[in-house]
Amino acid sequence: MRQFIHTLHISTPGRGMVEFTDQVRLWVGMSEIREGLLTLFVQHTSAGLLIQENADPVVQHDLERFFARLVPDGLPMFEHANEGVDDMPAHVRAALTPTSLGIPVRNGAPELGNWQGIFLYEYKLRPGQRTVLLHLIGE
Protein backbone atom coordinates (compact mmCIF):
# COMPACT_ATOMS: atom_id res chain seq x y z
CA MET A 1 0.00 0.00 0.00
CA ARG A 2 1.33 3.43 -0.98
CA GLN A 3 0.12 6.89 -0.13
CA PHE A 4 0.69 10.41 -1.37
CA ILE A 5 -0.29 13.85 -0.08
CA HIS A 6 -0.55 16.97 -2.20
CA THR A 7 -1.65 20.56 -1.58
CA LEU A 8 -3.71 22.52 -4.10
CA HIS A 9 -4.01 26.29 -3.90
CA ILE A 10 -7.22 27.44 -5.54
CA SER A 11 -7.85 31.07 -6.44
CA THR A 12 -11.45 32.16 -6.02
CA PRO A 13 -13.07 35.15 -7.70
CA GLY A 14 -15.34 35.62 -4.68
CA ARG A 15 -18.54 33.82 -3.77
CA GLY A 16 -19.36 30.90 -6.02
CA MET A 17 -18.15 27.52 -7.18
CA VAL A 18 -14.72 26.86 -8.67
CA GLU A 19 -14.26 23.54 -10.44
CA PHE A 20 -10.89 21.84 -9.99
CA THR A 21 -11.62 18.34 -11.34
CA ASP A 22 -8.87 18.51 -13.97
CA GLN A 23 -6.20 19.35 -11.37
CA VAL A 24 -7.29 16.36 -9.28
CA ARG A 25 -7.35 13.99 -12.27
CA LEU A 26 -3.87 15.11 -13.32
CA TRP A 27 -2.38 14.62 -9.86
CA VAL A 28 -4.02 11.21 -9.35
CA GLY A 29 -2.76 10.10 -12.78
CA MET A 30 0.80 11.17 -11.96
CA SER A 31 0.73 9.22 -8.67
CA GLU A 32 0.67 5.87 -10.51
CA ILE A 33 -1.81 4.48 -7.97
CA ARG A 34 -4.26 2.36 -9.95
CA GLU A 35 -6.78 1.40 -7.24
CA GLY A 36 -7.41 3.27 -4.01
CA LEU A 37 -9.17 6.04 -2.18
CA LEU A 38 -8.73 9.77 -2.66
CA THR A 39 -9.64 12.09 0.20
CA LEU A 40 -9.92 15.86 -0.29
CA PHE A 41 -10.04 18.30 2.63
CA VAL A 42 -10.50 22.09 2.54
CA GLN A 43 -8.60 23.92 5.29
CA HIS A 44 -11.06 26.76 5.79
CA THR A 45 -14.19 27.50 7.84
CA SER A 46 -15.91 29.61 5.19
CA ALA A 47 -15.65 27.32 2.16
CA GLY A 48 -16.85 23.82 1.30
CA LEU A 49 -16.27 20.99 -1.15
CA LEU A 50 -18.91 19.54 -3.44
CA ILE A 51 -19.29 16.92 -6.10
CA GLN A 52 -21.83 18.52 -8.38
CA GLU A 53 -22.99 18.67 -11.98
CA ASN A 54 -20.41 20.28 -14.25
CA ALA A 55 -22.33 20.20 -17.54
CA ASP A 56 -24.79 23.05 -17.00
CA PRO A 57 -23.53 26.19 -15.19
CA VAL A 58 -27.14 27.07 -14.35
CA VAL A 59 -26.91 24.44 -11.60
CA GLN A 60 -24.25 26.53 -9.87
CA HIS A 61 -26.37 29.69 -10.17
CA ASP A 62 -29.40 27.86 -8.79
CA LEU A 63 -27.39 26.60 -5.81
CA GLU A 64 -26.18 30.12 -5.10
CA ARG A 65 -29.73 31.50 -5.29
CA PHE A 66 -30.83 28.79 -2.84
CA PHE A 67 -28.04 29.60 -0.36
CA ALA A 68 -28.70 33.34 -0.72
CA ARG A 69 -32.30 32.75 0.28
CA LEU A 70 -31.43 30.30 3.05
CA VAL A 71 -28.60 32.34 4.61
CA PRO A 72 -28.61 35.94 3.34
CA ASP A 73 -25.80 38.34 4.12
CA GLY A 74 -26.27 40.89 6.91
CA LEU A 75 -28.85 39.05 8.99
CA PRO A 76 -29.26 41.04 12.23
CA MET A 77 -29.42 37.80 14.24
CA PHE A 78 -25.69 37.20 13.64
CA GLU A 79 -23.30 38.85 16.09
CA HIS A 80 -20.05 37.61 14.47
CA ALA A 81 -19.08 39.99 11.65
CA ASN A 82 -15.30 40.37 12.07
CA GLU A 83 -14.71 40.28 8.32
CA GLY A 84 -17.93 41.90 7.10
CA VAL A 85 -21.60 41.14 6.56
CA ASP A 86 -20.74 37.93 4.66
CA ASP A 87 -18.61 36.50 7.49
CA MET A 88 -21.14 34.61 9.60
CA PRO A 89 -23.32 33.62 6.61
CA ALA A 90 -20.15 32.08 5.10
CA HIS A 91 -19.61 30.03 8.26
CA VAL A 92 -23.24 28.84 8.27
CA ARG A 93 -23.05 27.86 4.59
CA ALA A 94 -19.81 25.97 5.27
CA ALA A 95 -21.49 24.14 8.15
CA LEU A 96 -24.13 22.90 5.67
CA THR A 97 -21.66 21.54 3.11
CA PRO A 98 -18.83 19.03 3.47
CA THR A 99 -15.25 20.02 4.23
CA SER A 100 -13.98 16.66 2.98
CA LEU A 101 -14.79 14.24 0.18
CA GLY A 102 -13.88 10.60 -0.39
CA ILE A 103 -13.64 9.43 -4.00
CA PRO A 104 -12.73 5.91 -5.14
CA VAL A 105 -9.85 5.62 -7.59
CA ARG A 106 -9.96 2.94 -10.27
CA ASN A 107 -7.70 2.48 -13.28
CA GLY A 108 -5.61 5.44 -12.12
CA ALA A 109 -8.46 7.98 -12.13
CA PRO A 110 -11.11 9.31 -9.74
CA GLU A 111 -14.32 7.33 -10.30
CA LEU A 112 -16.66 10.24 -10.94
CA GLY A 113 -19.97 9.71 -12.68
CA ASN A 114 -21.17 11.39 -15.85
CA TRP A 115 -21.59 15.13 -15.35
CA GLN A 116 -19.86 15.07 -11.95
CA GLY A 117 -17.15 17.59 -11.15
CA ILE A 118 -15.22 18.47 -8.00
CA PHE A 119 -15.87 22.01 -6.79
CA LEU A 120 -14.67 24.32 -4.09
CA TYR A 121 -17.58 26.46 -2.96
CA GLU A 122 -16.33 29.86 -1.85
CA TYR A 123 -18.76 31.54 0.53
CA LYS A 124 -16.95 34.87 1.03
CA LEU A 125 -17.70 37.79 -1.28
CA ARG A 126 -14.13 38.90 -1.92
CA PRO A 127 -11.59 37.02 -4.05
CA GLY A 128 -9.08 34.85 -2.22
CA GLN A 129 -6.87 31.79 -2.05
CA ARG A 130 -8.06 28.49 -0.60
CA THR A 131 -6.05 25.40 0.31
CA VAL A 132 -7.27 21.87 -0.41
CA LEU A 133 -5.29 18.84 0.75
CA LEU A 134 -5.38 15.68 -1.33
CA HIS A 135 -4.52 12.32 0.24
CA LEU A 136 -4.36 9.25 -1.97
CA ILE A 137 -3.88 5.73 -0.64
CA GLY A 138 -3.84 2.54 -2.66
CA GLU A 139 -1.84 0.29 -4.96
Image (tube, grey):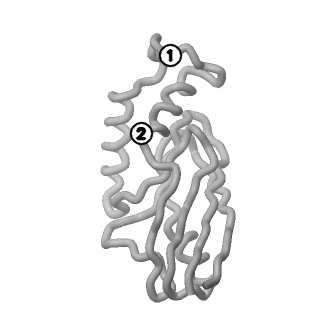
Q: Is residue 130 shown left or right of residue 39?
A: right
Q: Three-letter amino acid code at disc 1?
A: Phe
Which quadrant of the figure contains the N terminus?
A: bottom right
Q: What is the number of callouts on the image?
A: 2
Per the model, the C-alpha gap separating discs 2 and 1 is 16 Å
Residue 60 percent location from the top left of the image: 37, 49
Q: List the residue tagged with mark 2.
A: 96
Above or below 3: residue 107: below
Q: Earlier in the sequence, mark 2 or mark 1?
A: 1
Residue 74 is at least partly visible in this image = yes
**Residue at the spot x=55%, y=61% of the render?**
40
Q: Residues within 10 Å of mark 2 (few under 14, many from 20)?
A: few
Residue 132 percent location from the top left of the image: 62, 57
Residue 13 percent location from the top left of the image: 57, 45
**Residue at the spot x=53%, y=63% of the render?**
20
Q: Three-letter amino acid code at disc 2?
A: Leu
**Residue at the spot x=47%, y=37% of the render?**
95
Q: List the residue tagged with mark 1.
A: 78
